[in-house]
Image (spheres, rainbow, N blue to C red):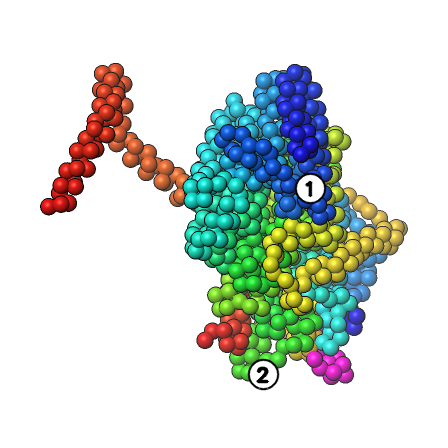
Amino acid sequence: MIGFILIVFVSLFFTGIIIRTKSLAAGRKGPGILQPLKDIIRLFRKGSVYSQTTSFIFRLAPVVYFSSVVMASLLVPFGPSRAVIGFEGDFIFFAYVLGLGKFFNIISAMDTGSSFEGMGASREALFSMFAEPAFFILMGSFALLTGFTSFYDIFNAIHLNSYTGYALGTMAALVLVLLAMIENSRMPVDDPKTHLELTMVHEVMILDNSGFDLGLILYTGYLKFAMYGALIANFFIGGLALNLALPIYLLIQFSFAVAVGLIESFMARFRMSHNAQFIFALSSVSFLIFFGVLLIMGKLN
Amino acid sequence: MALINIFLASTLVSVIAILIADSRGKGMVVLASVLVNAGISSFAAVQVLMGNSFDFMLSGSIPFGEVSIKVDALSAWFILTFNFTLITSALYGLQYMKRYVAQKSEMALHCISFVLVHLALTAILVVQNALVFLLFWELMALSAFILVIFEHHKPKTIRAGINYLVQSHISIVFLMLGFIYVAFKTGSYSFSAITAFSTSQPALAGTLLFLFFFIGFAIKAGFVPFHTWLPYAHPVAPSHVSGLMSGIVIKSGIYGILRMVLLIKADFTTIGYIILFVSIVSGVYGVMLAIIQHNLKRLLAYHSIENIGIIGIGIGVGCIGLGNGNYGMIALGFSGALLHTLNHSLFKSALFYAAGNVYLAAHTMNVERLGGMIKLMPKTAILFLIPAIAISGLPPLNGFVSEFLIYGGIFNWLSNAGLVGMIVVGFSLLSLVFIGGLAVLCFTKAFSIVFLGSPRKTLPENIREAGFWQLFPMYLAVFAIILIGLFPTLFIGILQQPLSLFIGGFIPQAGSMGFDAVSSLSEIIYLSLGLILLVILVLRLRKWITRNASVTFEPTWGCAYPSAAPNLQYTANSFIRTYTKLAKPFLDIGKREIDIDEAFPSKKQYATQPYDKIERYLIDRPLKAIKVFIGWFLFLQNGKLQRYILYEIIFILSVIAIPFFYEKIVSFLNVLNHL
């Protein structure tokens, strides 16, 4: 339960921290940490403009997207304290329920009949397809290493106390961070600040959303970021006492947000045609983790 | 015993009744016959699943001897699966075929074939005698052939039908060789002889025998590379037959494979690896080709190959479990495969019926000509969307449940896999995830290009939503899809009986299941229900919060381009363009393109013609080679009567001469040997 509350708590500030970091890196003062939240509250109260081409799918999709992310974050534990609901193989449900949200996002973009949104939808479908194997191989490797198949048990049983272990931990953190970037449509795969529709992925899919729906989609993005941040943090706080785990958790979430801001300040987005290869390369990194686990377990002798 | 007689009698009566009835009556007779026969066989199946036995010996006739009829739990599961889709298919066919009542003779043949296919499908599930099995297998192939070629005046249809017929017979050849070999060794055509034979022989013989049967059944099921008939036969058939073929006829191949797993005692580890490999290839290749199809029914047909692949992964995992004694793998692998068989028959038939509705309304299956159908046919659209989500394996629907079980089987493997096993686990996971991702790409494409946006080409006038009875079979299927999705444990409970056949001697020890997917599913129920409740809650919340807010309708934001037209929309081809570029090495896309190359461009053209690379290299090339080889003997066929008489004389003379000289040759050889 604490896990979910913390994710909601962190989601309130996460994007604010990213934006503040970017502002500071660009030499500006920047808006307050709570500005994104205020924007959303304003959007919630606003009226909507719907495209005449759209059907009920377009109105349903943001809600399904939000619900799928909420359901996924219910599965994320907080170090020593269990998740709201957890069971063996919960990470499979985690990935698939997020897939449901993506499915609706894609068809909602196609519902507008806009060529730009179609472009974004096509990219989103392809990129998420390439990103999923990396997550599964990663979790599969840890299932193999620990002998458990739920988030809570895996995180609490991981002991990376050898050189191979540290290497694995670094690689796993890398894969998770990059996955979070892909899933949240951030640099280096997607640039949320680009001004040209042709070069967007996620932003272009929601061009026609407005009012409450847009607010919901934006908030879902923040929630998703916090959820992935929580996953990364869990990787380090499994098995720690609560009073130690909480500061580390918050610190990791904070530095994750700062890192995202810094990456976006100093890096350019990849060429769109290179994205697929880049994401697929993630799967190979997770395969490296898999072989590393085999090595640790002495299966490779 | 009485049940069998009633079943046969009702089939006979309905065949006669179809001949007598008028065109409209024929359909009702089929429906009545299907309902009666489904009722009878389901009654027996339910009895068996409740723990009673259903085992009879039909008194022998000359060629067959005594025929054992037995419904065990595996047959029962398949009977229930088949009956459901047979009923929905008959219901849908009744409405779909209304357009064709003028074609009287075709109609009669079609209806009779439908009744016979039901008889054959039920019979192959229950007979325990190889000869009778083959007979009904042939009956199924033939009647399915007649069902497929209903529109036989179209050359495409008849070509696809013959392709199917030829390949079904290759399947029968393999089965026949297997059965005859066993009968030759043991002198009995009974199924129990197969068990007796494989237990008495070394494991290698059993394995080879199994592979023989596997190829025979795999052709029927549509495993790659034996799949090439499937994408031709399904699209040309009337939609209810497509649903029937894709939903259950190909599952008879799956039944055959599972039956052989039960009958043959062999080296299941090797077999499991082979099935797993073939299935992974089928799954990935099937969906990869499905994505590039622009004919909606052909797309669905390729998806059947993918789903057969998923079922096969389950069977493969189960077999490896049998080989290395891993209880979790057996239980979850086989129950995943069995449940996915049911699931696939549900969503695939519903998808084909929805495609049929679209076809009847728009008279085309080319997705590039469609669009915006959701506004014209909202119910059909929803009834396409729900199975589409299910087939992509997403929660909270049934596709997720069976895939979750198969994942469970794979994860259980981790507990006792060797190095090779571990690597195979990695690749199985990778491919299963990949299949899921590609399926999402495929069905977002199919749904959004057909139903969303606005029409890409002018659609026929007055498209209306299909009538209630035409939607009714889809409601049934979708209801079952949601039911299994939300209450999976109910159906897994029913699966325990068929599963116990596979588990057999294995006694599960406490905690022997590393990853108990079944108990996880009982937790997933809460999440699935929670998801639906949350969606409803947020929808209500939105309504409440925005109750005073203004809602206006404007044209789609065209990024400041003022004259957005429907033909500017993303097409199916552009939606998958990046994918096509990445997957190019595996695909065979005939592309004709006239590009812009001058300052004032004239008319441009861009057309793609996806083809199956495996078919090109495995079927077309060898066929060409055979044709060339046979061509060398073309001089024999020269149309001169004298030559033909000469051939006959040579033949008759050699028939007489060879036995005559045989003795001489043998004695000559003997003399040589003695020297």
Q: Residue at x 67, y 51 (%)?
A: B497
Q: Is residue A240 magenta?
A: yes
Above or below, comparing residue B41 to residue B323 in the picture: above
Please name the residue that numbered disc 1 is placed on: B45
Circles 1 and 2, Cβ within 8 Å, touching? The answer is no
Percent coordinates x, y for residue A257 in the rendering? 68, 73
Q: Quadrant of residue B322?
A: bottom right
* In front of the other: B442 or A34: B442
Q: Of the residues shown, which amino acid type is indicated by label 1?
A: Ala
Q: Is residue A198 visible?
A: no
- Crowdedness of circle 1 by 10 Å Cα count: few (<14), some, many (20+)? many
Q: Chain of mark 2?
A: A
Q: Position of residue B520 (x, y in %)?
A: 71, 61
- Say which of B263 and B363 sits in front: B263
Q: Which residues are the magenta region?
A: A239-249
How many angstroms separate mark 1 from mark 2 (CA)?
56 Å
Residue at position x 61%, y 56% from top?
B504
Whether the magenta-drawn stretch holds residue A120 is answered as no
Q: In the displayed structure, would residue A44 be above or below residue B386?
A: below
Which image quadrant for residue A18? bottom right
Binning the other alpha carbons within 10 Å of mark 2 as few (below 14), some (14 to 19) or many (20 upward) gives few
Disc number for residue B646:
none
**As drawn, which residue projects farthest toward the left?**
B675
| Vertical side of B624 occupied by B10: above or below | above
